[in-house]
Image (tube, rainbow, N blue to C red):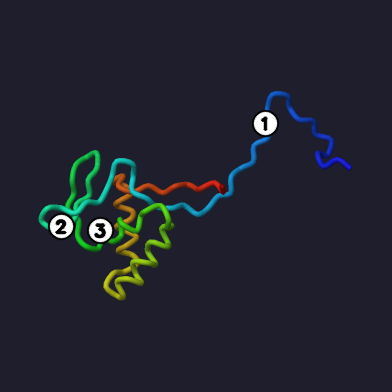
Amino acid sequence: MSTDRGRRPVAGKKRVHAPAIAPGRLQLAPGVQVEDGLDGQAVLVGPTGRVQLNGSAVAILRLCDGSRSRAEVVAEMVRRSRPHLLVSDIGEFLDAARAREWIVEEAGMGAK
């Protein structure tokens, strides 16, 4: 019995399967990196220049390595900071970093 249910393949078109979609992962935008400054302060270096960062900002941005979703970054920062950082503060920083194009969220990753 045929599984194509009477459908004929269209000549010249290949059947494409959609990749499995994983939750979005945060990573630094292309051309952006966090570096240790000469004075011991970390700086964000990107196409628009250099920005001095505080310790919390550095920790958050270093978690944006393409292996974690937004929720995972927030959860890890809360775990590391105990009650020091609020979930809303971390979320606001991630929103600002995304608006400034320091980080990007990958829409999904295909299964390999």
- Farthest residue in the bottom direction? 83
Seen at 37% across and 53% down, the residue is 65
Q: Are marks 2 and 3 in contact (CB under 8 Å)?
A: no
Seen at 19% across and 54% down, the residue is 36
Spatial CA span between label 1 and label 2: 53 Å
Spatial CA span between label 2 and label 3: 10 Å
Q: Position of residue 111 (x, y in %)?
A: 56, 48
Closer to us: 110 or 75: 110
Q: Secondary structure at mark 3?
A: helix
Q: Secondary structure at mark 1?
A: loop
10 Å crowding of disc 3: few (<14), some (14-19), many (20+): some
Q: Amino acid at mark 2?
A: Gln
10 Å crowding of disc 1: few (<14), some (14-19), many (20+): few
Which of marks 3 and 1 precedes in the sequence?
1
State left or right for residue 107 relative to residue 16: left
Q: Which residue is mark 2?
A: 41
Q: Is the N terminus in the top left, top right, bottom left or bottom right quadrant?
A: top right
State left or right for residue 102 relative to residue 11: left
Q: Which residue is mark 1?
A: 14
- Farthest residue in the right direction? 1
- Farthest residue in the top direction? 12
Q: Are marks 1 and 2 in contact (CB under 8 Å)?
A: no
Which of marks 3 and 2 precedes in the sequence?
2
Closer to us: 60 or 83: 60
Seen at 22% across and 45% down, the residue is 45
Q: Which residue is mark 3?
A: 58
Q: Is residue 30 above or below residue 37?
A: above
Q: Position of residue 79 (x, y in %)?
A: 36, 72
Which image quadrant is residue 15 in? Answer: top right
Which of marks 2 and 1 precedes in the sequence?
1
Seen at 29% across and 41% down, the residue is 31
